């Protein structure tokens, strides 16, 4: 074994952690295909997904997914923050098998330490939208986080996701619309969503020059996209009818404008309001969009199970700090009390390894899978997830890190570049 390089096809015994129903050995399967000179339908070069997708998407969709707040400074800092840390490999570490990638997040045992980030309006990237990506997430055994701004209903996403692990992301209406919030939560629960992710950084959309230049908002069109949850909601529908004496379908532009205002109501809640969500959701609650230690501590105080250290991919506040840069101090403050998840800037396996070494329980994959969706539909989403996991598996393997558990993938596996 010691002389075999990872590039040889080695029929290793299956790692114990691999679910028999879901045997995935990325390292082996990818190199096997490579050896047989079978060309993949999509590149493995992670940096190519964005330009290739932009070459096939409309200018509006490109501006929407790749766009950022203001000058894009926060976005650039998200990516740059990973370069400040380097992995320091160890040699001759006894490792019985391929690295064990499994983690326990929100009391759920997951085969892999990633989840599909909530992304709205996915039908602007592919006609099958969220149904395609939810099906891909189930295929790849990765949790799917469904956005409130989805272009597919809660029930249809659940159906497409089958037996997959799925979590629901809430854009939280004003308290005057509690009945609507309760309706969404009940639908999500009934459809098998097990955890609730409440996004706190987007009570209105950020200053996005790309969308403003395109005059583009997916909601505000005569055939609105991203309003499927509202348009299929019994409470929203009956209230709309009461207000206007017409059905949603009779004036979709008006209904879309009202739904948009409902889920992006501005900042009108406080930490005390989290109690309401706890009353109406009996599973784990995760607050998404945390960037500082004070807020992380408040999350512990109000009794939620997790947070996502995230700045929404740099799409909300310009001139902001890179998300990864804030992760270590947040983990230090609350990592023992709640699950700390991470997103904003994950682009390759090493990025996942670094965020986890700094204490993240798992990472949300955002734009990369959207580019996969735009390029090849659900198969493209599968490819992106597989590629990131294969890359992670091999990166850990070659760095002498036997698993993603906090005992192996520690802060000591990294060095800060500015300390060298
Ligand atoms: C096109 C697009 C739509 C998004 N929609 C949502 C959403 O509906 N709800 C949400 O919580 N986050 C949303 N996000 C943020 C992602 O969940 C995630 O935080 C972000 O993409 C991470 O940054 P990255 O993709 O650059 O790694 C969206 C991001 C993009 C790019
Ligand atoms: O664009 C976003 O970042 C986002 O969160 C969103 C909001 C509304 C519809 C789709 C995505």
Image (tube, rainbow, N blue to C red):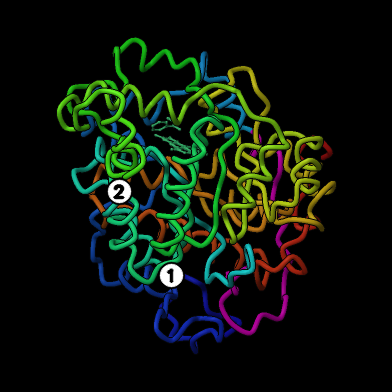
Q: Which contiguous range is marked in magenta? A: 81-103
Look at discs 1 and 2 and give the one toward the viewer.
Answer: 2
Q: Earlier in the sequence, mark 1 or mark 2?
A: 1
Q: Which residue is mark 2?
A: 153
Q: Nearer the viewer, residue 284 or 120?
A: 284
- In the image: residue 140, left or right of residue 225: right
- In the image: residue 296, left or right of residue 16: right
- Magenta-span inclusion, residue 84: yes
Determine contact: label 1, label 2, CB under 8 Å: no
Q: Nearer the viewer, residue 41 or 68?
A: 68
The image's mark for residue 65 is none
In the structure shown, which secondary structural element does the residue marked by tag 2 occupy? loop
State whether the magenta stretch is mostly helix, strand or loop: loop
Is residue 377 shown above or below 64? Answer: below
Return the x and y of residue 409 as percentages of the image width and height: 72, 63
Instruction: Give the image quarter of residue 58.
Output: top left
Return the x and y of residue 415 as percentages of the image width and height: 78, 48
Would the CB of label 2 be found within 8 Å of ligand 1? Answer: no
Label 1: few (<14), some (14–19) or many (≥20) C-alpha neighbours in 10 Å: some
Return the x and y of residue 277 as percentages of the image width and height: 60, 47
Q: Quadrant of ligand 2?
A: top left
- Magenta-span inclusion, residue 90: yes
Instruction: Give the image quarter of residue 134.
Output: bottom left
Residue found at x 15% / y 28%: 250
Residue found at x 30% / y 48%: 153
Residue found at x 38% / y 26%: 260
Q: Which residue is mark 1?
A: 26
Residue found at x 53% / y 49%: 364
In the structure shown, which secondary structural element does the residue marked by tag 1 occupy? helix
Q: Nearer the viewer, residue 230 or 348?
A: 230
- Label 1 to label 2, Cα distance in Å? 32 Å
Would the CB of label 1 be found within 8 Å of ligand 1? Answer: no
């Amino acid at each position: 074994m010691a002389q075999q390089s990872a590039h040889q096809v080695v029929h290793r015994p299956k790692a114990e952690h691999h679910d028999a129903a879901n045997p995935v050995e990325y390292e082996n399967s990818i190199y096997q295909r490579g050896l047989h000179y079978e060309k993949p339908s999509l590149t493995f070069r992670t940096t190519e997904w964005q330009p290739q997708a932009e070459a096939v998407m409309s200018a509006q969709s490109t501006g929407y997914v790749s766009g950022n707040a203001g000058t894009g400074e926060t976005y650039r800092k998200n990516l740059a923050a990973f370069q400040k840390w380097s992995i320091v490999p160890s040699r001759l570490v006894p490792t019985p098998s391929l690295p064990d990638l499994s983690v326990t997040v929100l009391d759920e045992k997951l085969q892999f330490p990633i989840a599909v980030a909530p992304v709205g309006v996915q039908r602007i990237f592919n006609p099958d939208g969220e149904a395609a990506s939810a099906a891909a997430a189930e295929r790849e055994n990765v949790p799917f986080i469904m956005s409130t701004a989805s272009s597919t209903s809660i029930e249809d996403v659940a159906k497409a996701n089958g037996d997959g692990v799925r979590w629901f992301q809430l854009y939280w209406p004003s308290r005057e619309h509690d009945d609507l919030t309760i309706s969404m939560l009940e639908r999500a629960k009934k459809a098998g969503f097990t955890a609730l992710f409440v996004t706190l950084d987007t009570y209105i959309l950020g200053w996005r020059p790309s969308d403003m230049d395109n005059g583009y908002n997916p909601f505000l069109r005569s055939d609105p996209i991203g309003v499927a949850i509202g348009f299929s909601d019994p409470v929203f529908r009956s209230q709309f009818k009461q207000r206007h004496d017409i059905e949603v379908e009779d004036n979709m532009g008006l209904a879309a404008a009202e739904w948009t205002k409902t889920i992006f109501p501005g900042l009108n809640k406080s930490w005390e309001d989290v109690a309401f969500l706890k009353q109406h959701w009996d599973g784990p609650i995760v607050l998404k969009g945390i960037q500082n230690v004070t807020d992380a501590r408040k999350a512990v105080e109000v009794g939620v199970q997790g947070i996502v250290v995230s700045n929404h991919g740099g799409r909300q506040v310009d001139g902001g700090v890179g998300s990864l840069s804030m992760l270590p101090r947040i983990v230090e403050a609350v990592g023992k009390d709640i699950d700390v998840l991470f997103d904003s800037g994950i682009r390759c396996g090493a990025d996942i390894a670094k965020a986890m070494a700094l204490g993240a329980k798992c990472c949300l994959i955002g734009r990369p899978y959207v580019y996969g969706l735009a390029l090849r539909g659900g198969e493209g989403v599968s490819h992106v997830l597989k590629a990131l996991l294969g890359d992670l598996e091999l990166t850990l393997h070659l760095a002498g890190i036997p698993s993603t558990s906090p005992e192996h993938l520690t802060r000591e596996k990294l060095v800060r570049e500015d300390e060298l």
